[in-house]
Amino acid sequence: MEIVVSGIRPTGNLHLGNYFGALSNFLKMQQTHHCFFFIADYHSLTTHPTPSDLHGNVKQVLVEYLAAGIDPEKATLYIQSDLPETAELYLLLNMNAYMGELERVTTFKEKARKQAENVNAGLLTYPSLMAADIIIHKAHKVPVGKDQEQHLELTRTFARRFNRMYNHEFFPEPTAFNFGAELIKIPGLDGSGKMGKSEGEGNAIFLADDPKIIRKKVMRAVTDAGPTTPNQPMTEAVAILFSLMRTMSKPETVDHFLNEYNACTIRYGDLKKQLAEDIVNFTAPIRERIHELAADEKYLSKVATMGAEKAHESAGKTISEVREIIGFRKF
């Protein structure tokens, strides 16, 4: 069975875009692959070096991914900082990572411009840590977005370099896991593009949002003055609302409002009210599960401990063999 590794940053609540994007990948993969999903608390320090509540952020992510369907019995779900082998492999990979190749990474250059006062070594060596996260489990597949493709290519470079330098075919070269057209892309409510926290709180519907907040956000969504001729092409803002409705509502509901739009009789207020209620109903079981899990510290501790133990079993074997290959031996 192929091994899959993917990280989750503890820097924000899950929203519908995540649910139908990366998380939908995870839920499918845990059924068919040997999966390692980790909460990347080390990685979060590259851009947030002094978090106000790192533990609380990690807990929130753990709770929400469990509530949304990650099964700790099927997949290995662990916290990055609970696995010291990752930090050791990160150090060893950095010994053979070159300044030039790290400085050429697009995301490093972009973030260095955005946070000029905090261009730290961790930001520069982010690809080395990502590589360590992946090859510590000898992963074959990694689900990555467009912005992470260059990092994955560096991971492949580091794996090849290790194998070549130590004359040992040890690490496999991981490839991108991509579901392609199967993914549903959820647009943001403000008409600016994809749903995401970075675009503003009002742009995203979070899985933990209270029904009142969901209704308020949807009712504030951008629209236009309405169609003036039958079958008039939709503006982007209105097309976004219908796109959300196709995901959240019943087909007959979509057809009803589409017919009204084409007949120039649509009332956007009615469409928004229906869409809001459909989103509230869709997120209700996840939201209830989030509240239950957040209050169950004993279960969360059990999940984190079990995940760390399973991850350690894999990573410990890798590090032991890496140390032997390099030449570290006890007297």
Image: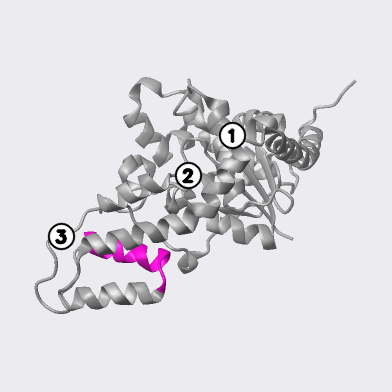
Amino acid type, mark 2: Ala
> Does dot 2 land on a helix, a strand or a loop?
loop
Answer yes or no: do the residues labelled 2 and 3 have beta carbons within 8 Å? Answer: no
Residue for point 59% across, 34% down: 59
In the image, which is nearer the foreground, mark 2 or mark 1?
Answer: 2
- From mark 2 to mark 3, how far is it between C-alphas? 29 Å
Specify the amino acid type for callout 1.
Lys
Q: Is residue 271 left or right of residue 47?
A: left
Sequence order check, earlier mark of 1 and 3: 1
Q: Earlier in the sequence, mark 2 or mark 3?
A: 2
What residue do we see at 87% from left, 23% from top? 330
Give the label, 2 or 3, closer to the camera. Answer: 2
Q: What is the quadrant of the N terminus in the image?
A: bottom right
Q: Is residue 242 magenta?
A: yes
- Residue closer to the observer: 11 or 229: 229
Q: Which residue is mark 3?
A: 224
Say which quarter of the image contains residue 27: bottom right
Residue type for callout 3? Asp
Q: Is residue 21 visible?
A: no
Residue 269 shows in this picture: yes
Span colored in magenta? 236-250
Tell me the number on the disc at residue 208.
Answer: 2
User: In this figure, which residue is indicated by the disc labeled 1?
Assistant: 59
